Amino acid sequence: MKARLIAIGIIFSLATVVFVARLISIQIVSDKIYYMDKTQKKDYVEAKYGRILDRNGIALWDRLLVGGDFERDVYYHEHLEGLSAILKGVVDSKIRELRGQKAVVRSTYKPKRDIPINEIEITPLIEGKDVHLSLDLRIQEIVENVIQEYVPKFGAAGASVLVMDPRTGQILAITSFNPEKGKYDDVLHSFEPGSIFKPITAVIALENGVDPKKRIDTENGKWQVTKNSNEKIIKDTHAEKTCNMQEAMVYSSNIAFGKYVIEGIGYEKFYSGVRNFAINENSSGFPLRVSHKGFHRVPHLRTQAAQGFGQSIDMTSLDVVKAFSSIANGGTLYNPKLILRYGIDSAVTERDSVRRVISTTENTRLLREMLRGVVDLGGTAENVKSKYDFLEFAGKTGTAQIIDSTGKYKAGTYNSSFIGLERASDPHFVCLVTMYHTKKAGATVAGPVFQKIMEQIYLHPELSPATFALKFAPADSLCSDVSFVGYTKQAALDKAKGIRCNIRFDDANKTGAVVAQTIKRDSTGKYLELSLREHQRNTGLMPDVRGLTLKDALGMLEHLNVIYDGVGNVYTQIPEPGEYISRKSAVHIKLKETI
């Protein structure tokens, strides 16, 4: 019995020793680990994003908190598909000023307590700031409206447009269409430019002392560079025996520009000249992704000649437009600018010059005159000439064949382009239009898009860069390119007066807002009639608020729960007009600005 008690005592003593040792290990040896695991944690406070605004301070995008936790991206002009895609790219580029910086706080708690005994801020909270883009929403809307009209008209897959101020490099409007995906994209994809590249070859030739008056043997429209019978012949659509540089530009001679590279400039100088324009180089501070294959030397004479007229070369819309901008502004290459570092205050003047790429203003003047001849002297873009005398369109057409999956040119399908200046003597805009997968030439499908965009900008009372433009522009009594829908009666009268339109109302005694416009005819000829609708409330039926301002729409829907997106005038509504509604009904309306 005694032995048993001794054994039990020993076992109990050992268990006590183990328990005390474990307790010491937890409370003393592992005190630091235990303390960190159980009583300290890091808390994060997310920064509020800034907004994205256009150059005039109009909101384009915001990220809002819905229900306290859920973040929602708001595209205020989502009807502009090209703009929405570009904004997505800007947001995804993770601009630090826009995102801000989240706070990191280390909190210490007593065991089983929810309230911290102290908090230490490890990283401070910095709220996001508003970011101003160089885009002008009014020009962007003009661009996208014209695209929507002409893409189906010409059977194109889609269109990319870039409008730049050549005096600053600021991008005023941009869409990037991806023909492979069949939708607008936030990536600028490269393409083979075709004949819109010829003015760059001409600049390089002038800079290397080539005489623009010298006549080039254009071989009656067929040229075999190496005289190898297996070599593909270079052809001209407008076959001539000889031509000078002006004629080569006007009639878009492939042979002349191929010979400028091989016989006039020399390939190495040509290659260096192209590189001087920063072709395929990423621009510092540009937020969008740019996809290109690079510009490389080629060893074969036939391919070298082809690069002179825009084949076997890879460019993005940025590459082409910044090169043309140097022709427009007297010779300076500017970095393309989409973000204004200093906001609205710098919208007019902010620029980042890279270098002077054309040595004399005389060379730029010669190039602008050549490009004007493409439109005015019976060239490939004679159909682009404006009906307004004050617009001196100058530009270049391009009809580039598409390379298929086998690496060969696809017959009968083109990427058709036009790039131009609106006034050769004093350009304020460079505009590139590319229509994808078309069956027709650049002058036919891209030229009219350029023409209408530039005319609408100049006829806009707030956008026209020269006051004389409105003064001398012949009045278009039908105002066929202008929308009055959504304007109040007085606002419509004011707008019509500003752009010299002759309008009439369906009922001169009515007030309210314009809901439709129709071209009509009477004994005096055609005229534009505006239909007005007065505001009616609380009828038990869903009213038609399309075309109204947000204020007027909310006034008509004051007894309902209204959710709205965008700014400007209502263009769509749910429920549809005329449906029965109760006071508890929810209504969703979308708004967009009209030009």
Image (cartoon, rainbow, N blue to C red):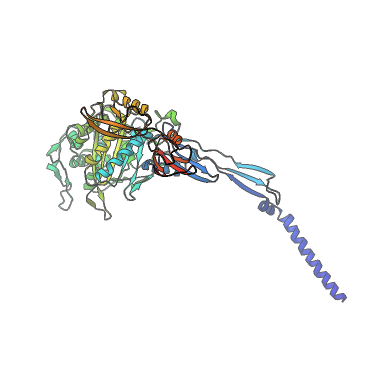
User: Visible in this render: residue 444?
Assistant: yes
Q: Is residue 260 left or right of residue 560?
A: left
* Image x and y of residue 472, in percent: 26, 23
* Badge count: 0
Coordinates of residue 89 in the picture (x, y in percent):
41, 43
- Residue in the image at 19% along x and 42% along y: 254
* One can see residue 358 in this view: no
Q: Nearer the viewer, residue 61 or 238?
A: 61
Left or right placement of residue 181 versus residue 371 in this view: right
Residue located at (65% from left, 46% from top): 107
Q: Looking at the rendering, which quadrant does residue 165 occupy?
A: top left
Horizontal and vertical percent position of residue 411: 21, 51
Specify the quadrant that holds the C terminus.
Answer: top left
Where is residue 306? Give x, y as percent. Answer: 23, 45
105 sits to left or right of 580: right
Q: Quadrant of residue 449?
A: top left
Residue 276 drawn above or below residue 298: above
Give the residue at x 13% y 41%. Answer: 239
Indicate whether 35 appears above or below 589. below
